[in-house]
Amino acid sequence: MNKNSENTSWWKRFMKSMTKAHDLGTEEDILLDHDYDGIKELDNVLPPWWLAGFYITIAISIFYLIMVFGFGKYSQYDELNDEMATAKEEIEAYKAANPQLFDDANIVAFTDAENLAKGKELFTSKTCVVCHLADLGGSIGPNLTDNKWILGGDVKSIFNVLTNGGRPGKGMIAWESTVTREERIQLASYIISMQGTTPAVPKPAEGDIVWPAE
Ligand code: HEC
């Protein structure tokens, strides 16, 4: 036997063990005895290479089930909780780095012409005029030029009303999602700047908070 034929027989033996193929010419041994319109069937065994792959997928599925649904760091719930915790930390860090965006105690009314003009423009463009009128005299909403306030007339109170809305059911919605923080301060500043002006048809004063406080 030369080297080549040795190799061939090794390879052949390997292929045979992997496929368990039935030897050619002896199909009679495994021929099933039924016959469908002339089509016959051989009773071959499942090839070991294929079976091995099948068993491996079963083993992987058990491993996967335990790791993903059971314990282990691949648990989807743990992953979600980790991400939520990270997000919370990032939000806190952002708040800490930008306190002026979140701390209402820092709000100061603008007094410069530019910001007040912007506030006036917003009062129209954000539809405040519909309920409070262009001269702030009041219609559905209260008069904003007198010194009587339902919810408070200082810049923080007004800002708070714009952010969170008035009392439930009164018609003054929360504007937090549609008017930016900066714009809400500009609006509040404009309203404060209109204190003491005389509207064409002023609505009778509402509310018992007097501002500026006496
Ligand atoms: C749909 C009508 C409506 C619109 C639009 C509206 N408001 Fe009001 N607003 C009201 C009503 C009604 C109240 C009274 C709320 C209450 O009694 O709790 C009110 C209350 C207020 C107050 C508090 C007044 C007080 O006496 O404490 C301020 C300030 C105010 N609105 C500003 C605005 C601004 C600025 C806008 C536009 C971004 C606006 N409103 C849009 C109806 C409206």
Image (cartoon, rainbow, N blue to C red):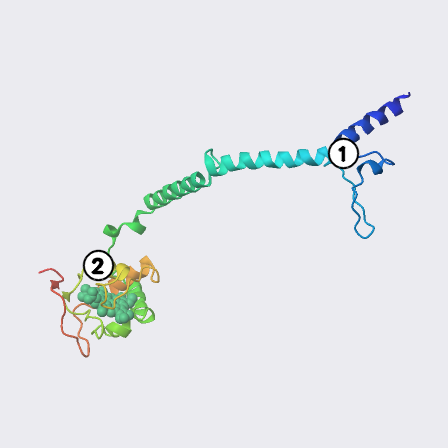
Residue at 81% across, 49% down: 39
- Mark identifier at residue 19: 1
Residue at 42% across, 39% down: 82
**From the Cβ of disc 2, is ligand 1 less than 8 Å away?**
no
Residue 43: horizontal and vertical position, in percent?
76, 39
Residue at 58% across, 35% down: 60
Looking at the rendered structure, the secondary structure element under dot 2 is helix
Task: Kindly identify the amino acid type of the residue bearing the numbered disc 1.
Answer: Thr
Residue 41: horizontal and vertical position, in percent?
78, 44
- Mark identifier at residue 155: 2
Bin the neighbour count of mark 1 within 10 Å (Cα to Cα): few under 14, some 14-19, many 20 and up: some
Q: Report the quarter where the C terminus lies.
A: bottom left
Quadrant of the rendered image containing residue 172: bottom left
> On the rendered structure, is 155 left or right of 87?
left
- Tell which of 9 and 19 is nearer to you: 19
Looking at the rendered structure, the secondary structure element under dot 1 is helix
Task: Kindly identify the amino acid type of the residue bearing the numbered disc 2.
Answer: Val
> On the rendered structure, is 127 left or right of 69?
left
- Tell which of 140 and 179 is nearer to you: 140
Residue 122: horizontal and vertical position, in percent?
32, 67
Residue 64: horizontal and vertical position, in percent?
54, 37
Using the numbered discs, state the Cα–Cα distance from disc 2 to disc 1 in whole angstroms. 84 Å
Quadrant of the rendered image containing residue 159: bottom left
Q: Which residue sits furthest right?
A: 1
Find ligand 1 in the image and state its quadrant.
Answer: bottom left
Whether residue 162 appears in this view of the structure is yes
**From the Cβ of disc 1, is ligand 1 less than 8 Å away?**
no
> On the rendered structure, is 77 left or right of 46?
left
